Image (cartoon, coloured by chain):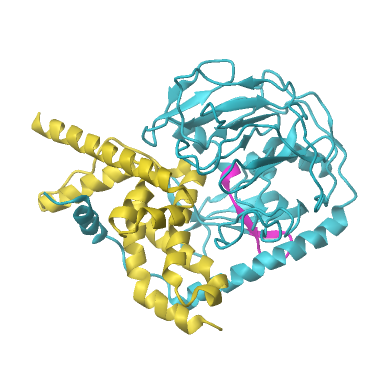
Amino acid sequence: MNGYVDFEAFVVARRDALLRTAYLLTGNHHDAEDLVQSALVKVVPMWTRIQDRPEPYVRKVLVRESVSRWRGRRWREVTTDVVPEATRHDTADRADRISLLEDLRRLSPRQRAVLVLRYFDDLTEADTAAALGISVGTVKSHTRDALARLRHQQSGEEQRVAT
Amino acid sequence: MDTLRDRLAELADDAPTGGEPAAELWARGTRTHRLRAAALAAAVLVVGIVSTGIGIRLADGDGDHSAPAPVPASTVGISLPIQYPVGEDLPDLGAAPGPLAAIWLVPHFGGPPEAVGLVAETGTFGTLPIDLPAEDDPDIPENVEVALSPDGRRIAYPSVTSSLVVHDLVSGRDSSPLSEFETRSGYTWVDATHLVGHVAGGSDADGWVWEPGTTPKPVNPYPYLQGYRGRNIWVFIDGGGPRSCSSTVLADSTGRVQVPVLCDVIGFIGSSFVLGHWNSDRLHGDWNNPDDGNGTVVALNIRSITTHPFGSAAPRPGGEFDDPALHHVVVTAGAPTRVAFATDLLGQTLDTRDGAS
């Protein structure tokens, strides 16, 4: 059980934060839970090497797993043009969340990961590149493309609402 | 107006909380680690039994009526275990080495990766003279990947000048779509001649299907990739013996399922240290250090599958199925992340070796 006490403390303290990132990466509760658990299981064999500063490593595993899972399991994902209908009790904030969730789902997994790491986890471009195993230049281009795509999607949404 | 940062933070408030106890995660992590070590030992044990060599004559185009130009019948010269030539310079296989049993990329960080192939007919390892782009090329939106057709005859990859090249390993000829065609990297062969991928800059539903020599057709790729799902299952050898395997958690249109499978370990190629590939479990590894990889490539012949609802030990009613494609699955256990197998070619080899399988 060498290292287990530290592992348990880390899980208790940081799991919910990891789940927040995972939810943005996957857009799905079940997948977010599965992704975080998978990442935590994967780091166990390396725990004694990373326990002094585990979070960057765990997040690296998390985000790379999210991209590689999407690649291997594209078949299971189903896209739809139908956004879930908001109930009368839904607030404007709720509608905005659903809209953002749908917009994120339309990005490529790597574009989505770059946005989440840069604008939610507040990583630098260099740290984002290291986490994803890509160059800073690729981070920049993904960020630019993803933001443009989000803007395009939002403007299209607004036009539909206006008409 | 809220910034994107604010909106993401609000969206994250919908995230789930909690999960399995830390003790359970720890136990699973240590168990997985042990199983991977046991996988190598199990493979060696079984290989000792079956390592008399294969030498199998391939059948012509079994059931694949869509293939217009089947690979000529040939002898597969792969015997198990295959000994990777440790420390030796690999020969250049040339443009037309014949069908490959497997191909993978040896990363050279900051430069183009090197493609290494295993020639099915001779069992020879060697390098392929293809002009792959550098991994960190900002103009390449995804990592470099090479896809190998199920019959081992064609490879698809991004080159330095085109987002998609298909190279015929028998004729030595290259094919590319028209110059204005742009695709994401990462393609899938859905049969011996048809390739499916995603349009660059498009959504996940914006795809294409292409048969070299024709014009790519825009399609929703999901129906194609759904039919391909059997080959995407990754299986790990379980601790119950060489006939017992377990898969990762999968999902289909009916929801998440766990898929226990029964399989035979046929053998392995490479070894636990000579492949030297980066592995997602070894993020601190040195990509260029051949002693730092832990990939073991294991061939498995899947026998049967039972699906379980996620989190349940009870089988899903009617969840047992027998997918013919799964008999042909050749998977990796703790292996390099980017090995591509000629699944049909190896599947035919396994079937022939097993007789009436």
Residue at the far right in the pictured view: B52
* Nearest the eye: B93 or A63: B93
Q: Is residue B251 visible?
A: no
Q: Is residue B115 visible?
A: yes
Q: Is residue B37 magenta?
A: no
Residue at the far top in the pictured view: B214
- The location of residue B54, given as percent across then percent down, is 86, 43
Q: Is residue B244 magenta?
A: yes
Identify the residue at image location x=55%, y=35%: B188
Q: Quadrant of the C terminus of chain B?
A: top right
Q: Is residue B295 above or below residue B23?
A: above
Left/right placement of residue A118 relative to residue A43 reads left
- The location of residue B204, given as percent across then percent down, is 39, 37
Identify the residue at image location x=62%, y=69%: B33
Q: Is residue B320 above or below residue B21?
A: above
- The location of residue B331, given as percent across then percent down, is 66, 49
Left/right placement of residue B211 relative to residue B269 reads left
Identify the residue at image location x=60%, y=35%: B132
In the image, the chain rendered in cyan is: B
* Nearest the eye: A155 or B64: A155
Left/right placement of residue A81 relative to residue B273 reads left
In the image, the chain rendered in yellow is: A
Left/right placement of residue B319 relative to residue B2 reads right
Identify the residue at image location x=69%, y=37%: B342
Q: Is residue A42 above or below residue B308?
A: below
* Nearest the eye: B76 or B233: B76
Residue numbers of the magenta segment: B231-245
- The location of residue A115, given as percent across then percent down, is 32, 49
Q: Quadrant of residue A30?
A: bottom left
Q: Quadrant of residue B253?
A: top left
